[in-house]
């Protein structure tokens, strides 16, 4: 018995042991929070009822884990601690003082909790949990356990497969594909890329989700060319091919690293300048499925503030009846500015710049490609801070460990 007590005391005093235990507890908490959030994007939400007390308990448990991680594990450097203070201050202030969007508090706590946690493990938990719930939801919808919403619109018939809306279902597929690509990286096989293309065709045909289908096709093509570049090692010795590849590499890194900042600026400027008197703007708005005009309506009716505000939106999700007055901000960028506030908006842009910088330092072209795809998807959909869709925001403070022994050669000089 004394030996067991001494062994336990030794383990408790071992920093690495405590770090591993706290990492496991964080991943378990993440899995529970993710499952709850994911299920609330499906028609299972009508079976849940009020879970306010459960949500409070989950956040308290996560907060306890965060405090333990910060106090019992290795000391943080001042830059990391500054980021932690910045993120938690902005996210919690925006939640408590103005907007009361639950995803702000949840995402803020999860970002801080992910500090020094393996992001590969986070991605694995997201992928396994997401695939499991997606399959369960689709089966339940087909069996009549939950409602399978089918929208007969002018463009096409759109099926939700148990989700609250067809584009929500397709957005889940996008982020599951991105998580899978992150975990597989250059080990991806061409048959897997072919399956991704098949998924894009599936959600385009059944959900008429053009943006999400396009994102999957785009990331599949990028992965194809990344794989192709890995297979021509000998040809890289030729001067002209090596210089061409270096040039493309630099453009790719720059454009993906700053993609969110660039596309955010474009979307906000286009929305703010939108006018019905401009034929070009009207055509662009039709191409963007009225995201510019609805965003402009938001800018006209609500002020832009530091900590945001709660804006009541009425969309089509979760029901078949079209509302008398439709108002929904689909673009993540417009929603961040109006609903979450400039403080959170600045933090999110900083987060993805830092993730891009870390990906560049590790020459992780696949993660850079993922950032680019997320930046495009967020122009048209509102899921950037919803953990049920996007886990990559957590990567800013997580560990980018990898089991891959090789990466593509770096061309940085």
Image (spheres, helix red, strand yellow):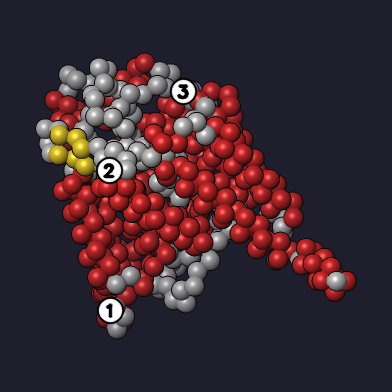
Furthest-bottom residue in this view: 234
Q: Position of residue 289 (x, y in %)?
A: 21, 33
Judged left or right of residue 59, residue 345 is: left
Marks 2 & 3, CB-CB < 8 Å contact: no
Along the polypeptide, which appears first: circle 2 or circle 1? Answer: 2
Q: Quadrant of the N terminus?
A: bottom right
User: Residue at the spot x=32%, y=37% of the render?
Assistant: 164
Measure the C-alpha gap from mark 2 to mark 3: 35 Å
Where is residue 185 shown, x and y percent of the image?
A: 38, 67
The residue under the point 24% across, 25% down is 321
Q: Along the line of sight, which residue is nearer the eye, 229 or 286?
A: 286
Residue at which label 1 appears: 232
Which label sits on residue 178? none
Q: CA distance from mark 3 to mark 1?
A: 53 Å
> In the structure shown, which secondary structural element does the residue marked by tag 2 occupy?
loop
> Which residue is under mark 2?
144
Nearer the N terminus, badge 3 or badge 1?
A: 1
Task: Out of 321 and 63, give the one closest to the viewer.
Answer: 321
In this picture, is 393 found above or below 180?
above
Q: Nearer the viewer, residue 30 or 66?
A: 30
Point out which mark residue 310 bears: 3
Residue 306 visible to an observer of this rendering: no
Q: Position of residue 253 (x, y in %)?
A: 38, 58
């Amino acid at each position: 018995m004394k030996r067991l007590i001494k062994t336990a005391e030794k383990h408790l005093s071992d920093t690495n042991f405590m770090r591993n235990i706290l990492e496991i507890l964080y991943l378990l908490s993440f899995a529970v929070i993710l499952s709850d959030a994911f299920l609330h994007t499906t028609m299972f939400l009508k079976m849940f009822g009020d879970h306010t007390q459960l949500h409070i308990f989950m956040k308290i448990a996560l907060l306890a884990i965060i405090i333990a991680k910060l106090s019992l594990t290795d000391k943080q450097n001042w830059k990391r601690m500054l980021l932690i203070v910045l993120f938690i201050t902005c996210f919690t202030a925006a939640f408590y003082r103005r907007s009361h969007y639950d995803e702000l508090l949840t995402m803020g706590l999860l970002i801080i909790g992910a500090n020094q946690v393996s992001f590969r493990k986070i991605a694995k938990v997201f992928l396994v949990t997401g695939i499991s719930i997606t399959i369960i939801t689709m089966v339940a919808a087909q069996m009549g356990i939950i409602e399978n919403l089918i929208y007969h619109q002018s463009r096409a018939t759109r099926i939700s497969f148990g989700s609250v809306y067809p584009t929500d279902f397709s957005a889940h597929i996008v982020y599951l594909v991105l998580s899978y690509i992150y975990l597989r990286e250059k080990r991806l096989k061409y048959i897997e890329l072919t399956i991704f293309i098949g998924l894009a065709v599936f959600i385009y045909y059944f959900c008429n989700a053009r943006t999400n289908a396009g994102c999957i096709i785009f990331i599949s093509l990028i992965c194809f060319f990344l794989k192709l570049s890995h297979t021509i090692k000998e040809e890289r010795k030729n001067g002209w091919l090596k210089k061409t590849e270096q040039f493309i590499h630099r453009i790719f890194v720059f454009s993906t690293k700053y993609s969110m900042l660039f596309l955010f600026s474009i979307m906000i400027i286009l929305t703010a300048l939108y006018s019905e008197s401009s034929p070009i703007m009207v055509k662009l708005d039709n191409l963007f499925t009225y995201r510019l005009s609805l965003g402009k309506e938001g800018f006209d009716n609500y002020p832009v503030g530091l900590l945001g505000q709660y804006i009541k939106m009425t969309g089509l999700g979760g029901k078949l009846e079209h509302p008398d007055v439709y108002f929904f901000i689909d673009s993540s960028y417009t929603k961040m500015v109006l609903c979450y506030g400039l403080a959170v908006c600045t933090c999110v842009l900083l987060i993805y710049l830092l993730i891009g910088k870390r990906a560049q330092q590790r020459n992780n072209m696949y993660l850079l490609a993922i950032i680019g795809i997320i930046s495009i998807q967020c122009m048209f959909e509102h899921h950037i801070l919803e953990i049920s869709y996007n886990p990559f925001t957590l990567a800013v403070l997580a560990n980018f460990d990898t089991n891959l022994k090789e990466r593509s050669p770096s061309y940085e000089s």
